[in-house]
Image (spheres, rainbow, N blue to C red):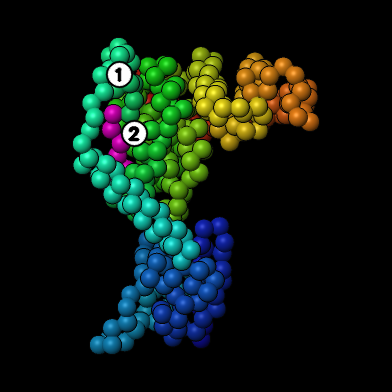
Amino acid sequence: MSVSLTFTFRTTSHTLHLPTDTPLSVLHSRLEALTSVPPSLQKLIYRGKKIQHRQNDDSEPEPTIVQAGLRDGIKVQMLGSTAEELKQLTAADSARQSKERTLRERALKPQVKLRSTGSSSSSSSSHQYRFHRIEPLSHLPRSETAMESLTTLSQDPAVLHVMQKHRFSVGLLTELAPHENPGLLGLNVGSGDTIKLRIRLDTYDGFRPYLEVRRVLCHELAHNVWGEHTDDFKELNSQINREVAEFEAAAAHGTHYLSDVRNAYQPSSNEEVEALVHVLGGTGPQGDDTMEERRRRALEAAAARLKSEEELEQSCGTSGPQKQSGL
């Protein structure tokens, strides 16, 4: 006799027909051939149960797939990282440790004190308008990577720029687990007391693109002032995103094309388009592009941005009286 089992890994499903006496090790090997995930990293979840690879113990026989609870027609969700992803993670961890070692060595060197010639007001405001605490969810896997992601967001120069400009202060920056409020990408509690961001993929085996998460963060920062998605909120949210783009364009020294900052921000109104065309493109032709061509591309980007903003607001929940706002 045989059983038919469907295994879903990320967005791809695989159907296997296996004899009922198939050992679990054989199943893990078949799945490795299909997904490139080593048996030791495979986690199989079905009907509230979990199967993980374990080393063979010669003192007792290896269980079969049926003995492990897998029956005909069962659908199984598989989690895990591929060998290549594990290699990249190890390399990133090695680079992080090397950076930390360098910073520790620098900290041990004698420091030269410099006399400050400026006022202390900018220093005090810099300390005040920032993220005061950063905490990943320690019970979730790869919390170290989550911490690195949150730290990068909290130290993003463009984000800190708008926080200083608008005097935003956030008590705690943390993550929103995929199983918490599945329809939300972010949550602002208490007008900046806490901001939660969904930085992980729904499958828990990876992280969402940085620029997408940063865009959600900008949205949540606007909720520090406005709890509901009113016109005032939309105007502030648009302003914050524009200021992020303009800050990065100014830092680029010589950026002239709107496409140079397309990943950071796309304008959401004709007025913003005009502002960016002026800042990034000047008033005359640049290379093979005319002002009209740059403006046309900018307007197309504006239309896409408006559609995206509408979709984001549809997935945003707000509990007005408590000033708990979410995206």
Q: Residues within 10 Å of mark 2 (few under 14, many from 20)?
A: many
Q: Position of residue 204 (x, y in %)?
A: 42, 53
Q: Is residue 43 above or below residue 216?
A: below
The amino acid at mark 2 is Leu
Residue 135 falls inside the magenta stretch: yes
Residue 311 appears left or right of 158: right
Region of the chain picked out in magenta, as a range: 132-138
> Disc 2 designates what residue?
173
Mark 2 or 1, nearer chain start? 1
Secondary structure under tag 1 reads helix
Would you say residue 153 is visible in this rendering? yes
Q: Position of residue 206 (x, y in %)?
A: 45, 52
Q: Residue at x 25, y 87 (%)?
A: 59
> Of residues 193 and 48, which is closer to you in this image?
193
Q: Residue at x 34, y 84 (%)?
A: 62
Q: Position of residue 105 (x, y in %)?
A: 25, 45
* Distance from the alpha carbon under mark 2 to that under mark 1: 21 Å
The amino acid at mark 1 is Ser
Discs 2, 1 touching: Cβ within 8 Å: no
Q: Residue at x 37, y 16 (%)?
A: 167
Residue 42 falls inside the magenta stretch: no
Mark linked to residue 123: 1
Q: Is residue 11 above or below residue 136?
A: below
> Of residues 248 and 199, which is closer to you in this image?
248
Q: Residue at x 50, y 44 (%)?
A: 209
Which quadrant of the figure has residue 196? top left
